[in-house]
Image (cartoon, helix red, strand yellow):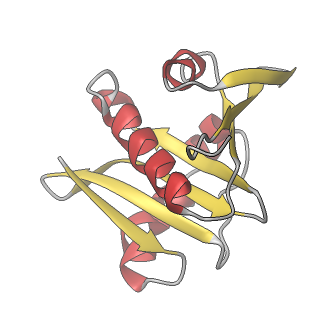
Amino acid sequence: MQLKKYKHNEKELWCSLGSIVASRKIRKALGIAISSDDSYTWWICKEKGEVVGFGAVSIGKEVATLHHSYVFEKFRGNGVYKLLLKERIAFCKEQQNVKKITATATDNSKPILEQFGFYEISKRGKYFTMRLFINKGKK
């Protein structure tokens, strides 16, 4: 599997994701329409040139937010979500100002996020808001 990072304005990102993000099925699975702006960094996971999963991060003043995490059904259970999650958490930890990471989870993704240290802070309908504090070695 190949994992590649993109900035919001890179043409290759939207060439790879264009028809995918326009899909009603994907929007329904994510629970929201896919959006992006200059604060977003994206990761796309491909196998043999086919997109198997993707996710984004936006960086705020002290909070990073994981967005649009999705793995296609036929590739689930193969560690794609964990790979995307691991890379995005590492990216957040590299950012000087970020003290915590938030994510929205489903019943499927919540246990994986918990394996990475996230904990539930709220629930709305079928979605959980999760948080992870970043320990950068400071006391």
Q: Is residue 88 left or right of residue 61?
A: left
Q: Who's the residue at 75% across and 26% down the image?
A: 127
- Screen quadrant of the C terminus: top right
Farthest residue, direction left: 48
* Quadrant in which residue 15 is drawn: bottom left
The location of residue 30, given as percent across then percent down, is: 64, 40
The location of residue 107, given as percent across then percent down, is: 62, 16
Q: Which of 78/92 is in front? A: 92
* Quadrant in which residue 59 is drawn: bottom right
Question: Could one spot residue 124 in this view of the protein?
Answer: no
Q: Is residue 64 left or right of residue 86?
A: right
Q: Is residue 77 left or right of residue 120?
A: left
Residue 102, placed above or below residue 113: below
Q: Which of 49/63 is in front? A: 63
Q: Who's the residue at 34% across and 26% down the image?
A: 76
The location of residue 28, given as percent across then percent down, is: 66, 39
Q: How many marks?
A: 0
Farthest residue, direction front: 139
Q: Who's the residue at 60% across and 68% down the image?
A: 40
Q: Which of 51/59 is in front? A: 59
Residue 62, placed above or below residue 118: below
The location of residue 75, given as percent across then percent down, is: 29, 31
Residue 95, placed above or below residue 78: below
